[in-house]
Image (cartoon, rainbow, N blue to C red):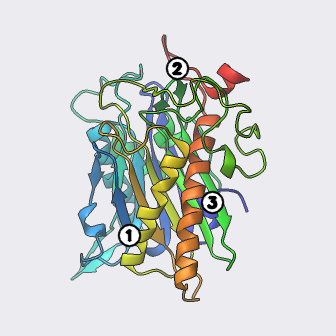
Amino acid sequence: MRNLITDIAGIVVGNAGDAALASGVTALIFETPAVASIAIHGGAPGVRDAALLEPEMTVAAVDALVLSGGSAFGLDAMGGVQAHLRALGRGLAVGEARVPIVPGAILFDLTNGGDKAWGMRPPYWDLGLAAARAAAADFALGSVGAGLGARVAGLKGGLGSASARTSAGFTVGALAAVNALGQATIGSSKHFWAAPYEQGAEFGGHGPPHPFPADALAMRLKSDAPENTTIAIVATDAKLTKAQAKRLAVQAQDGMALALRPAHAVLDGDVVFAAATGAREVEPSLRDLTEIGLIAAECLARAIARGVFSATALPFPGALPDWRGKYG
């Protein structure tokens, strides 16, 4: 186990970014089309092709999922991933045409100090293409891909991932670009809200604070403007229907509440995609489905903490510190 979402067979992930732009794209590609759905619990989302993921819609599976910086400009990134897949002959057959199905979501990183003066043509299509071409089983975390320009309250955000297995042997994983309105850490301490779910020392091994700091429950926000959003993907090798994938996305959203305070706010655009490769032919029971959702939420909480823990500060005046720089 790599402790990455790519521990699920048939999934690869690629990152691409521009240091001067301080933004980037992360592409998750399925080796064969996967059943997928979505849950949007934040008040300010930005998505592409999200409607087709609802259980009552006709398209049965997707070829890739994309997380991008750039706010609405980042929606171009999905086109770059589509171009890569089309060149490989991938996509939904519609007569003689092939249409790669590539939903995605974006986060806001336009005010992080990077050079966003790109002129008439935003760079995200090209970054999407580069991310798709870089897709592999091993990939970096922290200030890379869609997490390159991400920030949370008081700290640099980043890209995180985590994985686990259920008691019945189903593999579950999460991938998150953490750009939250709220805090990933508890009050003024170095401890993560996700500490109870940590495996080993994947984000420092510090556990919960003892005692909790007096300011633990004080609300701390990155800003009073809609400049936020945590976007994520959870996946499993279980064989799920589209409706079951929808329920998995809903249950996995709890991972944001376990790792961020506040989450799902009017100024957030919190989005979770859920996908099932079906690599394990065993039909999951109702108990299995419940545990897959539980583990997905915990993996997402861990991925969020790993994204912040692994991040490095942007090299611009006034940039937020990274976790290691602030807490050692």
- Amino acid bearing label 3: Ala
Residue where numbered disc 3 is placed? 137
Residue where numbered disc 1 is placed? 246
Q: Earlier in the sequence, mark 3 or mark 2?
A: 3
Q: Please tell me whether residue 319 is drawn above or below residue 13 in the rendered image.
A: above
Q: In the structure shown, which secondary structural element does the residue marked by tag 2 occupy? A: loop
Q: Is residue 120 left or right of residue 79?
A: left
Q: Earlier in the sequence, mark 3 or mark 1?
A: 3
Q: Please tell me whether residue 264 is drawn above or below residue 252 in the rendered image.
A: above
Q: Earlier in the sequence, mark 1 or mark 2?
A: 1
Q: Please tell me whether residue 289 is drawn above or below residue 200 in the rendered image.
A: below
Q: Can residue 60 be spotted in the picture? A: yes
Q: Residue furthest bottom?
A: 282
Q: Is residue 2 left or right of residue 136?
A: right
Tell me the number on the disc at residue 234.
none
Count of all numbered marks drawn on residues in the image:
3
Point out residue 313 in the picture as x, y percentages from the top left corner. 57, 23
Which class describes the residues within 10 Å of circle 2: few (<14), some (14-19), or many (20+)?
Answer: many
Q: In the structure shown, which secondary structural element does the residue marked by tag 1 occupy? A: helix
Residue at x 57% of width, y 80% of height: 287
Do the CB atoms of the residues marked 3 and 2 lie less than 8 Å apart?
no
- Amino acid bearing label 2: Leu
- Amino acid bearing label 1: Lys
Tell me the number on the disc at residue 320.
2
Q: Please tell me whether residue 62 is drawn above or below residue 70 in the rendered image.
A: below
| Distance from the alpha carbon under mark 3 to that under mark 2 | 30 Å
Residue 107 position by quadrant: top left
Of badges 3 and 1, nearer the viewer stands 1
